[in-house]
């Protein structure tokens, strides 16, 4: 007789562990990293400080932050082997595929990729965070047919990333905006990519294997690929006056609007609110094309909230407004998910380090509904 089991599709509503890294309050639309409100971190903190907070569980004092920032700078350079991997990919390759492969190669440069020592794993995490930004910028450069730039250690993480990508030192406003993009994407509890990271590392695979699994899981449009898909849609809409018709038709055709909806948030994603507030700030300084996309995004947001917000709990998520902001920073859509992955390395690593304190191999079950005890026939006897 078939056993009766309860299947939680997509592990919806299933708790996999205890954690003190991140709280997502999906009903109230609140997000905390290590107890600190995301709004405060976005306003007052820096990506380096947020990385320290996520990895060590407390905000650094001045000396700790200076030392940590220096450590991150020292780890920015990538090996010739990793650069060759990036160069060998054709310009047509998807950037996240290149990142996944290049990131996987980082373990080869570490004489001891696996460690059961927490301090050593924090050092590995710093390496991964710093080098992934360099890899991502290098991928963007190669895709554009340009040469890879060396890091500039006079600049902080965000400014250096923009410099390595664009060959221009950013102004203060762009540096701050890039920092905010990195901070808002740094961590988000047990989403699909973090879970993939944990699954890989629960086998005691090294932390590099874990983040590589995280990159793989981030790729799809239901997760890290949504921001690129959202901008693609805004471009398809073409003109602000076409927004409402487009959305109406898409919904009537049962299409999902990328950048809306969330497994946990049933209200406005607080990260999307922060990003929305930046649209106004950049409007005056952006070109006509970006301003048009901003107008389209605001009209789409209004319509979606009217139609599906309160009634269905489908609100803008972090991926909806990020596209126009990335474009303002001269980051092309094909690099969005790669930049997202660079930001998220810290969250993935913090979770692995925490999970290993009380590691348990992930091994869920499936309810088998196929046949058993079939008679094996020789191939010549099969119809
Ligand atoms: N547009 C239109 N309808 C939607 C949307 C959307 N963006 N999102 C959900 N719905 C509808 C579904 O069609 C479904 O309707 P139905 O019950 O009539 O079939 C219902 O809401 C439930 O949707 P599910 O996809 O089953 O819900 P789930 O909790 O699994 O979805 C998800 C979460 C995958 C994020 C979903 O909202 C979605 O696909 N959104 C678009 C992709 C996106 O923006 N992803 C980024 C998320 S944030 C991040 O990963 C960084």
Image (cartoon, helix red, strand yellow):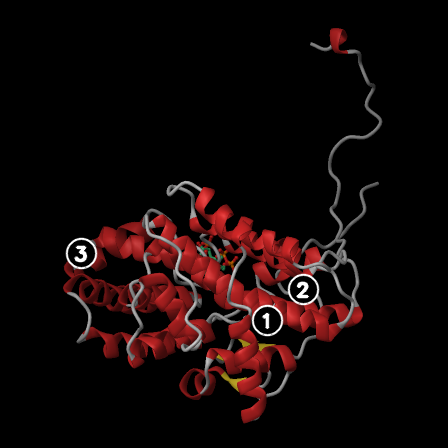
Observer-nearest residue: 310 or 29?
Answer: 29
Observer-nearest residue: 167 or 122?
Answer: 167
Residue identifier under label 2: 14
| Among the 4 quarters of the image, the one containing residue 259 | bottom left
- Mark 1 vs mark 3: give the one in front: 1
Lateral position of residue 264 relative to residue 136, left or right: right
Mark 2 lies on a secondary structure that is loop
Residue identifier under label 1: 126
Mark 1 lies on a secondary structure that is helix
Lateral position of residue 250 relative to residue 152, left or right: left
Observer-nearest residue: 315 or 47?
Answer: 47
Nearest to N terminus: mark 1 or mark 3: 1
Density class for disc 2 (Cα within 10 Å; few <14, some 14-19, many ≥20) is few
Observer-nearest residue: 8 or 161?
Answer: 161
Density class for disc 1 (Cα within 10 Å; few <14, some 14-19, many ≥20) is many
Density class for disc 3 (Cα within 10 Å; few <14, some 14-19, many ≥20) is some
Q: Position of residue 256 (x, y in %)?
A: 39, 53
Question: From the viewer's perspective, is residue 269 above or below residue 66?
Answer: above
Quadrant the C terminus occupies: top right
Q: Position of residue 336 (x, y in %)?
A: 39, 59
Q: Which mark is residue 242?
A: 3
**Marks 3/2: CA–CA distance:** 41 Å
- Taking the image as drawn, is residue 76 in sight? yes
Question: From the viewer's perspective, is residue 34 above or below residue 143?
Answer: below
Identify the residue at image location x=34%, y=57%.
230
Mark 3 lies on a secondary structure that is helix
């Amino acid at each position: 007789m078939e056993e009766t089991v309860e299947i939680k599709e997509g592990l919806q509503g299933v708790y996999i562990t205890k954690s003190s890294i991140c709280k997502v309050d999906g009903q109230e639309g609140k997000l905390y990293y290590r107890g600190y409100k995301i709004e405060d971190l976005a306003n007052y903190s820096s990506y380096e400080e947020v990385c320290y907070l996520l990895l060590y569980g407390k905000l650094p004092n001045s000396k700790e932050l200076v030392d940590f920032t220096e450590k991150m700078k020292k780890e920015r350079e990538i090996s010739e082997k990793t650069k060759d991997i990036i160069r060998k990919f054709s310009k047509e390759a998807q950037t996240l595929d290149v990142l996944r492969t290049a990131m996987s190669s980082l373990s080869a440069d570490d004489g001891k990729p696996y460690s059961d020592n927490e301090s050593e794993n924090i050092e590995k995490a710093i390496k991964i965070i710093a080098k992934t930004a360099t890899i991502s910028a290098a991928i963007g450069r190669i895709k554009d047919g340009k040469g890879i730039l060396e890091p500039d250690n006079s600049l902080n993480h965000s400014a250096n990333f923009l410099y390595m990508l664009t060959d221009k030192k950013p102004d203060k406003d762009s540096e701050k905006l890039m920092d905010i993009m990195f901070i808002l994407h740094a961590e988000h509890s047990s989403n699909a990519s973090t879970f993939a990271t944990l699954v890989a590392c629960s086998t005691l695979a090294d932390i590099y294997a874990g983040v590589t699994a995280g990159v793989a899981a981030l790729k799809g449009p239901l997760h890290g690929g949504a921001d690129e898909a959202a901008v693609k849609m805004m471009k398809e809409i073409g003109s602000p006056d076409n927004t409402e018709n487009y959305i109406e038709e898409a919904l009537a055709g049962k299409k999902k609007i990328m950048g809306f909806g969330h497994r946990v948030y049933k209200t406005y994603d607080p990260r999307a609110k922060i990003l929305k507030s930046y649209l106004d700030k950049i409007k005056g300084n952006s070109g006509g094309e970006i301003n048009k996309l901003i107008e389209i995004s605001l009209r789409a947001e209004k319509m979606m909230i009217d139609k599906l917000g309160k009634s269905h709990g489908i609100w803008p998520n972090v991926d909806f407004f990020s596209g126009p902001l990335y474009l303002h920073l001269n980051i092309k859509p094909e690099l969005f998910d790669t930049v997202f992955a660079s930001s998220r390395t810290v969250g993935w690593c913090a979770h692995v380090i925490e999970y290993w304190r009380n590691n348990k191999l992930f091994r869920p079950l499936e309810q088998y509904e196929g046949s058993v005890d079939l008679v094996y026939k020789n191939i010549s006897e099969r119809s």
